[in-house]
Image (tube, grey):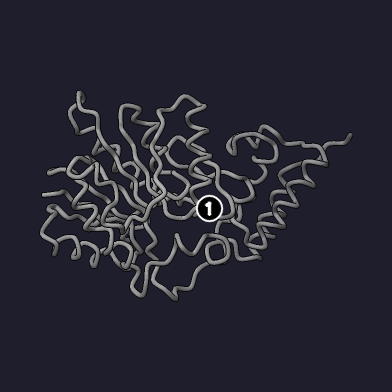
Amino acid sequence: MTRVALRPVINDAVETLRTAGVHSPRADAEHLAAHVLGVERTRLALTPLVPPEKLDEFRALVDRRARRIPLQHLTGTAVMGALDLAVGPGVFVPRPETELLYAWALAQLEALPHDHTPIVVDLCTGSGALALAVAHARPDADVRAVELDPAALVWARRNADDRIAAGDAPITLYADDVTDPSLLTELDGRVDVLLSNPPYIPDGAVLDPEVADHDPHLALFGGPDGLDVIRAMVPNIARLLRPGGVTAIEHDDTNGAALAALLTARGDFTDVVEHPDLAGKPRFVAAIRT
């Protein structure tokens, strides 16, 4: 069977995706090619010729991506930390920006005494991405994760089971509402690090088709200003954290100052700091429990 040159086919795919309005056409085309060939994207150059049936599979995926189906739905995975996690319809796809929240959490854990078993809570865990990435990096931690949406919990449990099979320490998953005043009362005043990537997009925001048509709206929208869920869960965060415990909450890029003011006004937090993402946009706010 005659093999076909891969690079011209990728270049054609890039133009197809660019015309369709995909924001990162070359990266997406190369990720899809790597997925089809079962290689790392960085090793595509080592596979210059491929069988025609692989190119047919690749072109079919490119056509679906051009219809603005999320890349991660086509490959079936999303990255968080060192992990590739299963994602698909019914669960929010973790974004690269949330890697900053994950890195911040690891830095906070590293500062704790090494003879202490840290308790970490991830509110609105979705696919389990943050909780499982932390548990992978810190097997000594007691990691708890909370999710309300039953469809998302299916993905979180699948990922948690996969990580146990791979040898990671298990996390504890809860089907619960992060705004419920009775949430995790057994952990009152004991949590060292509390993370959250909650629904925070203001109602009515104009979103890309990959988000508007494929991410569950329950994981996206946070009321008129995007802060409804955050306002309601902040009392729980204050209750759960031990004195000196830390929290970091991701937010819409219009809400950094508003979230910082919300935490400051409660009087339960100190050292409230706004953190930008790599593009310089406000991304998450961190604080220490007084």
- The x and y percentages for residue 93 are 50, 52
Image coordinates of residue 219 in percent, x first then y, are 45, 59
Q: In the rendered image, which residue does mark 1 sit on? A: 151
Q: Nearer the viewer, residue 207 or 139?
A: 139
Asked whether the viewer can see residue 27, the reply is no
Q: Give the crowd class for mark 1: few <14, some 14-19, many >=20 residues within 10 Å.
A: some
Viewed as shown, does residue 157 lie left or right of 201?
Answer: right
Among the 4 quarters of the image, the one containing residue 234: bottom left
Taking 168 as reference, is 220 above or below it?
below
Q: Residue at x 67, y 60 (%)?
A: 66
Q: Residue at x 13, y 52 (%)?
A: 271
Of residues 35 and 44, the one nearer the viewer is 35
| Circle 1: residue type | Ala
Task: Tell me where residue 24 sits by quadrant.
Answer: bottom right
Which residue is at a point 33% across and 73% down the rendered structure image? 225
Q: Is residue 91 above or below residue 193?
A: below
Rendered location of residue 222, percent (x, y)? 37, 67
